[in-house]
Image (cartoon, helix red, strand yellow):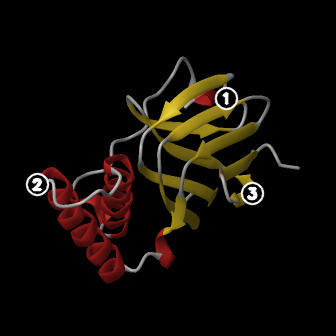
Amino acid sequence: MSTPESRTLSVSLVTPDGAVFEGEAEMLIVPGADGEIGVLARHAPLVAMLKAGSTRVHVRRTEDVREFATGPGFFKVEQDRALALVDDAVDVDSIDVARAEAQLEAARAELERVDAGESEADRWQLEQRIRHAENQLQVATGGGGERVQPRIGAGAEHI
């Protein structure tokens, strides 16, 4: 499975539509509700809530990194296996910025019509569309801010 120099863990990134990524990785960084969570092989068992943000799968830590704009969900680590269950995940290379901007503007405009009593559209659905488009834009454009380094736990194996 892995050598001592490059331990890996099994990573699954899953949406209601199915797996978006499944494979071995040296590190996984997910957007935890209270900050980013970085996980290496041999991480202590963990269950956490995720917020919308950038999920990065480091297949090879510095050479091959897959990034996804992910929605909120749940995260579980157990026995060199990490499972992220999220409501949506889009590969950063597949994000169409112009399309996401158009979706964001359309959803905001419809929400304004709802607020003005001019539309019967579902507010929750519109808010979800807005969050989805904002998240894709933030991840695709680098988010406009610095990435937070993952918190370090009790030892190097608990990142």
Residue drawn 80% across and 30% down? 79
Label 1, on which residue?
A: 43
| Front of the two marks 3 and 2 | 2
Left or right of 146 in this view: 79:
right
Q: Quadrant of residue 159?
A: top right
Left or right of 56 in this view: 124:
left
Which structural element holds mark 2? loop
Which structural element holds mark 1? loop
Q: Residue furthest right?
A: 1
- The label on residue 22 is 3
Q: Where is residue 141 in the image (x, y as percent from the top left)?
A: 30, 69
Left or right of 115 in this view: 20:
right
Q: Position of residue 33 (x, y in %)?
A: 41, 32
Closer to us: 130 or 78: 130
- The label on residue 131 is none
Observer able to see residue 60: no
Left or right of 48 in this view: 118:
left
Observer able to see residue 110: yes
Say what amino acid the circle numbered 1 marks: His
Which structural element holds mark 3? strand
Say what amino acid the circle numbered 2 marks: Ala
Residue drawn 39% across and 53% down? 125
Q: Where is residue 109 in the image (x, y as percent from the top left)?
A: 18, 66
Distance from the alpha carbon under mark 1 to that under mark 2: 50 Å
Closer to us: 99 or 108: 108
State which tag comes first along the sequence, 3 or 1.
3
Label 2, on which residue?
A: 116
